[in-house]
Image (tube, rainbow, N blue to C red):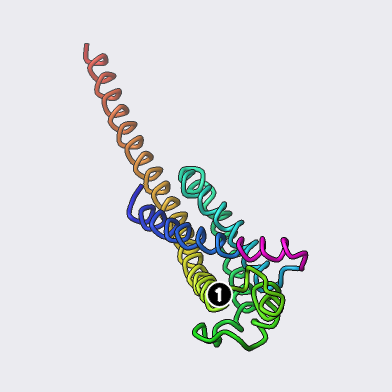
Amino acid sequence: MGLAGAFFSFWRLLQILTLIPTLGMLAYFVNGFVSSNQLTPNYILILFITSVLAAAWAIATLFRRRSTRESAIFVSFIDFCFIGAFIASVVELRGIGNASCTNFTAGPIYLSLGPFGYFGQTSNSPFAVDVNKTCAMLKASFAFGIMNCIFFAITSFLLLFMKGKDRDDRKERVVHRHSHDSRRGHSRSGHSRHNSRRRYYV
């Protein structure tokens, strides 16, 4: 597999290990909004959808390494697209970055969290029992989103490097085979001339 392939597998595993908790936590929020017949805010929904798609993509390309290597340019392009998707997701959720999870009782995120925030506390929703935990889950998802921007950038460039190395290896094999065939042809030609001289003298 080579060193580049081992690095690729390592970063893919990190992606999976950070994406699964992210989509799990965000699925909890999506379920809460659906159960309360409320629309899920964009800052949760965008990161949730991106995490689900990215996790499925990471798992598929990790366990199908041969086809991943053969289609390295395409896989690199999709990874690059996920960088953009995660950047958009993190920008949408950026409001949670300045929130205090020790006293999460104010701010635009708290007010827009439906059953998990202000509305939930005033209506005694079971989802708003511990708003500080809600804040911590959103902050963790936000952090994992930033991490995956970096992780997918690394795998995207690794795939381009692997593609370039494979191309160089193929060129080297072709040159070596051509050189070997040329030497063998030259040897056969010399042997043929030697035999013809022997027949002439006989």
Q: Is residue 24 above or below residue 106?
A: above
Relative image position of residue 115 (x, y in whole percent) = 69, 72
Q: Residue at x 50, y 72 (%)?
A: 140
Q: Residue at x 33, y 50 (%)?
A: 2
Residue 200 lies in what quarter of the image? top left
- Horizontal relation, residue 99 to residue 31: left or right: left
Stretch of the chain drawn in magenta: 27-38
Q: Quadrant of the C terminus?
A: top left
Query: Magenta residues: mostly which secondary structure?
Result: helix
Relative image position of residue 64 (x, y in whole percent) = 49, 43
- Horizontal relation, residue 43 to residue 10: left or right: right
Which residue is denoted by mark 1 in the rendering?
A: 130
Decide whether residue 78 is among the magenta residues: no
Q: Secondary structure at mark 1?
A: loop
109 vs 68, nearest the viewer: 109
Q: Residue at x 31, y 33 (%)?
A: 186
Task: Give the amino acid type for the residue marked by disc 1 in the picture.
Answer: Asp
Relative image position of residue 121 (x, y in whole percent) = 66, 78
